[in-house]
Image (tube, helix red, strand yellow):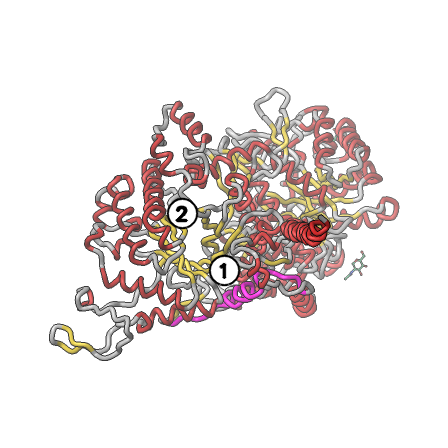
Amino acid sequence: MRLRYLYFVLCCQVLCVSGDPDAGSRTWARFLKLPYPEDEAFLYDTFPDDFMWSVGTAAYQTEGAFQKDGKGLSIWDTFTSAGNRGTGEVASDSYHNVHRDIHLIQKLKVTHYRFSISWPRIFPNGTIGSYNEAGASYYINLIHRLKRIGVEPVVTLYHWDLPDTLQRLYGGWSNPILADLFKEYAEFCFRTFGDNVKFWITIDNPFVVAWHGYGTGMVAPGIKGDPGLPFRAGHTLIKAHAAVWHLYDNKFRQKQGGKVSIALGSHWISPRKKSKENIKACQCSLDFVLGWFAKPLFIDGDYPTCMKKNLSSNLPSFTETEKREIRNTTDFFALSFGSVLSFQLINDSLKFGQTESLSLRMVLYWINAEYNSPKIFIVENGWFVNGNTKTEDAKNMYYMKRFIMETLKSIKYDNVSVIGYTAWSLVDGFEWYREYNIRRGLYYVDFLSPDLRREPKSSAFFYQKLIEKNGFPLLPENEPITGVFPCNFTWGTAANSIQVETIPSQFNDPNVYVWDKSGNKKPEKVEGVVVPLRKTRCGDYASIRYQVSRLHRMHITHFQFSLNWPSLVPTGNVSQVKTTLLLYYKCFVSELQRANVTPVVTLWHRTAQHSGLPAPLVKNKGWQNTDTVQAFVAYARLCFKELGDHVKYWITLNEPNIRDEQKTFLEGHNLLKAHALAWHVYDEEFRRAQKGQVSITLHADWVEPAYPFSRNDVEPANRVLEFRIGWFAEPIFGNGDYPQLMREWLQQRNNLDLYDYHLPHFTEEERKLVQGTYDFFALSHYTTSLVFEEVEEKTQYNTYLEVHFIPDTTWLKSPKRGAVVPWGLRKVLNWVKSRYGDVPIYIMSNGVDDDQTETDDKLRLYYMENYINEALKASVLDGVNLQGYFAYAFDDQSDPGFGLYGYIHDEFYIKLSLGHYRKIIDKNGFPSPTAPKQDCTLELYSCPGCSLFFTKKSMITFLSFIGICFVITVGLVMYYSKKPSKRYQY
Ligand SMILES: *[C@@H]1O[C@H](CO)[C@@H](O)[C@H](O)[C@H]1NC(C)=O
Ligand SMILES: *[C@@H]1O[C@H](CO)[C@@H](O)[C@H](O)[C@H]1NC(C)=O
């Protein structure tokens, strides 16, 4: 599959990128056609060996010391001192903490560090005449220290902190004279620091400087009102950059050998509806932000056509000489992407009616297509967390993971030349117009502590580990294995309910219904009226025949479905059973059996309506009332009695452990009792005659600690598992009581007086009743989530468990947002094994929703392939006693979007995944192509259920057993063959 994908990608490279104007506009169409879901799945791979891993800061955000050692004021000093704003006067106080910050940089193991020089620190009034040596020394010192730890500096000359004098005297960047002054300042920097600097960035994000500094007034100098002003400022910024690039190219490049560029920020945007006009609008939106600066500098020295058309006289123009001077003045593409522009600074007027989104990968692809495949250095990227978040910055960390994953895919799948990545930022600091209300650092800064203490955040650990591994290398445990399941492995499918053929109303009278076992098909007379041929034989039910044939086509051996308790016993009283429905079920299971499909029948499962209970029981407080328990037991007995000849596998309750809002622990207690009592009824009254098995199915999605390197999160993950699975599993499969951890946790909560949770106690009698009421462990599993301790942000997700759930944004998602995480299944199977030993386990439901309009359900196919492979690992590598797998769901009718059979216009159709499942079943797993065919005839010689014979270890045991038998036999034969002769001697 991967190979086919690469082939596709290669073809696309040739066809899709050719470098003509507006070449980027093909990006949207291209990303609609990528191989799904492979392209969206996690990519295990590493970055090129010389990839640059960097982290960055900006002077005004971190340095502080705003008047120290002769520094002049910048426009940000004056901008923030007006009114009640937070300021960068102290910020992270990096000026006084070079040593400490260097240490942090070293710990991250980055290869590059991006920082900016504060222009007014070196030239307090902006001109060379005001040169301040102390300021220059600070940067010399910083660069030397970086060099000493082997980290290359990436130096920004201008990161928004213009000397205030230049704003006051000349009106800042709106005055063309700034280009000359900037060149003077740049020349000083090249001369002073250039021997040690290989990467220069002239200006950071000229879009924000021009548009928001001189247009909206959101950032310093905070000017607004003149629609032409931002474009005049932008005009100067472009000329200033070009002049500085030429200066370097002419006077310094040869000796210093560095590269110079400008950091351009971009958002990403997608067409609201797919049409030529909308794509044009998207293209225009990017041109107004990124193209404004990128097109003159990277292509032809002129503004994008779309800007010129829209702005007319507000947009200055370049002379031909200027154009020649401006174009081609970059040595690489320095891209800034993430929170600075996205969703914050792009106002509606720049979106042209389209939808902003967050795809770094598409931006990279667009730049590559639009600007003739430049080398791209991501010089700023990241997300942010709330200002009150401390070191557990999950949101930031998973955004970073996602952006880096997209960068990797861009390199590997899209053939874009990305040469470096810069995480933003090293430490928390002053966040421009958002002041200290958000944090973007990898290191937490305690702004209230006297020494502005730094502490690594989760994202720092994450980034460090990632750099160490140079990406996401494929680990052995992530690779699929080959191998097969044991010979008697159960392959099934599951449905919530079965389709019940409509039974004509006169047949609701059980006396009318003729249960004709003889197969007599003649019309019959009932109460003097001749009725046409009725469903007198089970085989006459067209719907049953049809369902059985559909099951047959799947090659499954088992079918799990739920009876409809409210329909079967509408009053809740079993003396008033709906006989016709009962007979229908009887027919259904006997026909299944006749067709060699083993029915697995579930007595109760929660439904949206009435919690799956007969209406009178719901009125009577449902599972909170012990009468419901008694009603359930009577209903179970009825089912065992009526259907038990054909049913050998029973599930009492399906997923009783899904905790919803109203559910109390008392309800859980009653559900446990109902299960246990039903189990005992079977055990005592039916087991001997019917020889079946009874158990319960527990919902068992996996929960993974959100911070892979923090032990603190193991505890919350455990807590969730105990409350979700252990709640029901421990009383039945374990020690007969609720998990200790559950009791302790609730006790603790109750002590806080905020809560009043009642986890019932088992009497000794109840404990005996419940413990051990199983014949196997059945679980349903669909997805995995991440969890961490809820200590900092109190949000709506905060539950009594005090945990916070988040998605890993690199995980593949289903249309209903279910995360596809195959290894979660292996983990949960091992969890069960670690708790309850070698209990036989059935995966009673496992499946995913997919686009319902597609017969090509590729996501499900991918899901199935990978989840079953993880189940195989659990079985073969981990020795989990796994007995069976049931694909959920049988068809879309029972759960829309989940089915292996689709359902449209009253017709069923086969989806792609069904054929794939059948293949897996036929091969009993994933046999290696070179391995001999699995020989299941051996099964005849071993006992049924001794599937363990087929693992290598047990095979050796088995063979040694045979060997020992052989030796003993030979010995005995020899002994007895000798004996007579001895005897005869006497
Ligand atoms: C900046 O300061 C220097 C030295 O004090 C002075 O000579 C120069 O005129 C000043 N320039 C401006 C633009 O204020
Ligand atoms: C751009 O500049 C590079 C060297 O700096 C040169 O090799 C290249 O030919 C130039 N491209 C154009 C279109 O002028």
Q: Residue at x 63, y 24 (%)?
A: 453
Q: Magenta stretch containing residue 911, yes or no?
A: yes
Callout 2: SS: strand
Pick whichever, 985 or 463, lies toward us.
Answer: 985
**Type of residue at label 1?**
Trp
Callout 1: SS: strand
* The quadrant where residue 670 appears: top left
The CA span between labels 2 and 1 is: 18 Å
Q: Residue at x 63, y 31 (%)?
A: 456
On the image, the x and y values in percent for residue 146 come to 78, 34
Which segment is the magenta one?
Answer: 907-929
Can you tell which mark lies on residue 117? none
Q: Is residue 694 left or right of residue 222?
A: left
On the image, the x and y values in percent for residue 649 come to 40, 54
Which of marks 1 and 2 precedes in the sequence? 1
Q: Magenta stretch containing residue 645, yes or no?
A: no
Residue, far left: 528
Residue, far bottom: 522
Q: Residue at x 62, y 24 (%)?
A: 452
Q: Is residue 885 left or right of residue 937?
A: left
* Residue topped by disc 1: 491
Q: Is residue 388 left or right of residue 130?
A: left
Q: Is residue 883 above or below residue 515?
A: above
Pick whichever, 408 or 621, lies toward us.
Answer: 621
* The quadrant where residue 497 appears: bottom left
Badge 2: residue crowd in 10 Å (few <14, some 14–19, many ≥20): many
On the image, the x and y values in percent for residue 338 come to 59, 46
**Type of residue at label 2?**
Ile
* Residue topped by disc 2: 696
Q: Is residue 377 visible?
A: yes
On the image, the x and y values in percent for residue 115 come to 71, 37
Q: Is residue 884 above or below residue 501?
A: above
